[in-house]
Amino acid sequence: MATKLLKNSSLQGKPGIFIIKNIKRLLAFYVLFQTINYNAQIANYVTNGGFEDYYDCNGGNINKLIGWRTIDSSSSGTLPLYNVCNNNVPFDGYNYQKPFVGKGFGAATFFCPPPYCSFIGNRTYFRNRLKANLKQNKTYCVKLYYNVRDRSSYGIDAFGISFIDNSIDTITKGWIPLTFLNPQIQNVSGNYAIDTLNWHLLSGTFVATGNEKNILIGNFKSDAATGTVLINPTSLPNVGLDMYIDHVSCIDVDLPAFAGTDKHIIPGETLYLGRARDVGIDEACMWYK
C-alpha cells in the first residue's frame, strides 16, 4: 500500500509541475504584456518635463528634482533648484522670472568663457533620463521653452538638445564644452537668445536609432564657435549667459489617439478621457464635438 501511494503521489506530482511551469509562463507573459502596453502608452518621453515634481524642495540643487540631474553628480557645476516652494521663483534676489507653466523651471550656464570663468566651470548641462528608450526609426517632435537670465551680459545662438545612450555615464567632465556631441535639435545659427522677459520655443524633429535613453540640454559648441551679441552692458565685466528652460517634451509624431482604459460610471459621475496629463500633450491635441 505504501508503495502504491508513493507511485500515485509521484504521478499526481507531474501535472502539478506542469501547471506551475505554465503559471510561471503566464506570469512572465503578463509582465511582458504590461511592460509593452506601458511603453506603448508613453506620450512624452521626458521625465518631469515641467520641473514640477521633486523629492525635497528645501534648498539644494536640481538633483532633488525627479528625472533631472547634472551629467556627473560628483563633478562641479551643479544646477540650482528653481521652484516656488524653494522661495526663489519668481524672484531669486537678483533675477525675476515666472515659469512658462506651473511653479518651476531649470537654470544653467550656457556660456562663460575664460578668464572670467575658469575652463573647468564655464558650462553646465541639464540631464534627463527618459521614461524608456526611444523606438528605432520613429520620428519624434522635441520642444522646450527658453528664457535668458536677467544678469546675463551676452545673448548666444549656440544651444540645443542631444539624445544619447547610456555612454553618457562615461562623461566625467560635465563642466566644459562637449563639442564631440552632435545635438539632434540645434538652435539656428544667428537666432540669438536675448529676451529676459518672454519665453521662446526651440523645437525640431529627428529619427531615433532606438538607443536613446538620456537627453542633454546645453551649449555643445566651443567658445569660439558660439555666436554672441551684447545685451546688457551694465553686467560687464561679467561675461556670460545663463539660460532658463521649461516645458520640455519629446513625443512620437505618429502618436495614436488614446482615450484611456474602459471604465463604467453611473449617472452623475465624471470621467477623465484621454492620456494622463503631461508636458506637451494638451497643446498637441485638438478635440472636436
Image (cartoon, rainbow, N blue to C red):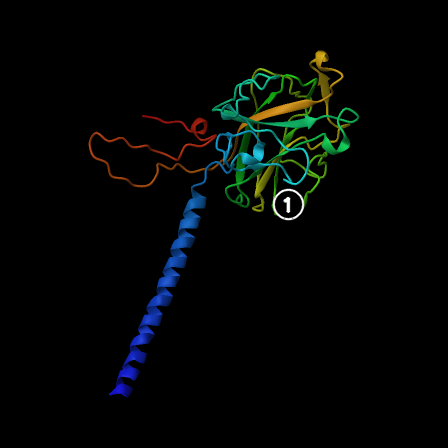
Per the image, the residue denoted by label 1 is 169
Left or right of residue 214: residue 155? right
Q: What residue type is labelled 1?
A: Asp
Q: Residue furthest left?
A: 267
Q: Which residue lies furthest to the front in this view?
A: 58
The answer to which of 260 and 53 lies nearer the viewer is 53
Image location (x, y in percent) of residue 180? 72, 39
Characterize the local packing of mark 1: few (<14), some (14-19) or many (20 or more) Cα atoms within 10 angstroms.
Answer: few
Image-quadrant location for residue 178: top right
Image location (x, y in percent) of residue 102? 47, 24
Question: Mark 1: which secondary structure?
Answer: helix
Left or right of residue 77: residue 54? left
Left or right of residue 269: residue 183? right
The answer to which of 252 and 127 lies nearer the viewer is 127
Q: Residue furthest right?
A: 115
Query: Can residue 205 be seen here?
Result: no
The answer to which of 8 and 95 lies nearer the viewer is 95
Image-quadrant location for residue 72: top right
Q: Residue at x 29, y 79 (%)?
A: 9
Image location (x, y in percent) of residue 206? 58, 36
Image quadrant containing the C terminus: top left
The answer to which of 85 and 153 lies nearer the viewer is 85
Image-quadrant location for residue 20: bottom left
Query: Can residue 30 be seen here?
Result: yes
Image location (x, y in percent) of residue 27? 38, 58
Image quadrant containing the N terminus: bottom left
